[in-house]
Image (cartoon, rainbow, N blue to C red):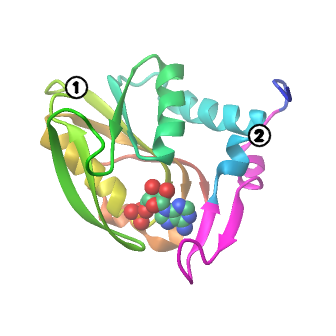
Amino acid sequence: MTVKENETQTPESIKSKIRDIPDFPREGIVFKDITTVLRDTSAFRHSVDLLAKHFEKQKIDYIAGIEARGFIFGSALAYKLGVGFIPIRKPGKLPSKTESISYDLEYGKDSLEIHIDAIEPGKRVLIVDDLLATGGTADAAIKLVKKIGGVIVGLACVVELEFLKGREKLPEDCKITRLITF
Ligand code: AMP
């Protein structure tokens, strides 16, 4: 086991572990591969810890993670903060009654779903994904949570691709917390 508990990580050192995959999933897209962060005990742990530090004094009732990579960071963050985790999933995956929303992606179109009874009205929800690109996914997730009565605390992600200006698509009052920018 390669547990390097004492190794200090900064956003810069975590950034250096993200791998660029050119032309994935389509020509012209540079995919930011975070699996190389996940497999590094210290980088993964610190990426979650650094995000958790930002939210430890805030009132959060739930973390809503966006499928699929938002589940990885979102569930770890929920565990760390001691709050519940709500999955926001691709269509047809959730077993009970859902609310859904369609949105535009950097590459294509998609929909997201949430269980309609996942959030009690007025509960405070932090949305989590691995990466903010054009903002369509995060914006849809925010709308979905609001639709079923949740109050948005903000959006937390590991990476923001600033040049895509995704934050401009999000509601003005949505606080964005990210560790790394490209
Ligand atoms: P967007 O809706 O454009 O903000 O896209 C965000 C979602 O797509 C996130 O869930 C990311 O995981 C994924 N994504 C979009 N662009 C990239 C990229 N260049 N590298 C890695 N993941 C991406």
Quarter of the rendering occupied by the N terminus: top right
Q: Amino acid at mark 2?
A: Asp
Q: Tell me, yes or no, whether the highlighted magenta stretch contains residue 30.
A: yes
Q: Tell me, yes or no, whether the highlighted magenta stretch contains residue 52.
A: no
Across and down, in percent, residue 73 comes to 53, 38
Q: Secondary structure at mark 2?
A: loop
Across and down, in percent, residue 89 comes to 33, 45
Q: Is mark 1 within 8 Å of ligand 1?
A: no
* Magenta extent: 8-32
Quarter of the rendering occupied by the C terminus: bottom right
Across and down, in percent, residue 29 comes to 56, 76
The residue depicted at 51 percent of the width and 47 percent of the height is: 69
CB under 8 Å between callouts 1 and 2? Answer: no
On the rendered structure, is 103 left or right of 22?
Answer: left
Across and down, in percent, residue 21 comes to 67, 69
Tell me, yes or no, if residue 11 can be seen here.
Answer: no
Q: Amino acid at mark 1?
A: Lys
Residue with the mark numbered 1: 123
**Residue 92 vs residue 137, the one in the foreground:** 92
Q: Give the number of the mark in front: 1 or 2.
A: 2
The residue depicted at 13 percent of the width and 27 percent of the height is: 121
